[in-house]
Amino acid sequence: MKHELAQLAGKVDWDWIDAQIAPLYSDKGRPEIETRFVVGLLLLKHIYGLSNEGVCDRWVAQALW
């Protein structure tokens, strides 16, 4: 939990973000993707200058460790 991304995740007000994004979700269709996951991927993409494919590849590689 000393990694800078883990520390950043602990400082984000996820409840506030969920409340701001909630009106954009529908109760129809496929189940929603958790806000924290989507925002986390966007942060990783921005911080490391990754493409959509690059952030997905990096996330998959981390999950396999």
Image (cartoon, rainbow, N blue to C red):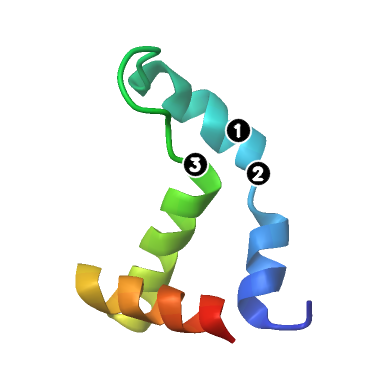
Q: Which residue is found at the position 30% from the left and 20% from the top?
A: 29
Q: Which residue is mark 2?
A: 13
On residue 56, the disc is none
Quarter residue 2 falls in: bottom right
Q: Position of residue 31 (x, y in %)?
A: 42, 28
Viewer-nearest of labels 3 and 1?
3
| Camera-nearest residue between 56 and 35 | 56
Q: Which residue is mark 3?
A: 35
Q: Say which amino acid is labelled 3.
A: Thr
Q: In the image, is 41 to the left or to the right of 3?
A: left
Q: Position of residue 60 (x, y in %)?
A: 43, 75
- Circles 1 and 2, Cβ within 8 Å, touching? The answer is yes
3 or 2: tag closer to the N-terminus: 2
Q: CA distance from mark 3 to mark 1?
A: 11 Å
Q: Which residue is mark 1?
A: 16
Q: Which residue is found at the position 37% from the left and 60% from the top?
A: 42
3 or 1: tag closer to the N-terminus: 1
| Camera-nearest residue between 60 and 20 | 60
Quarter residue 30 falls in: top left
Q: CA distance from mark 3 to mark 2?
A: 11 Å
Q: Quadrant of the N terminus?
A: bottom right
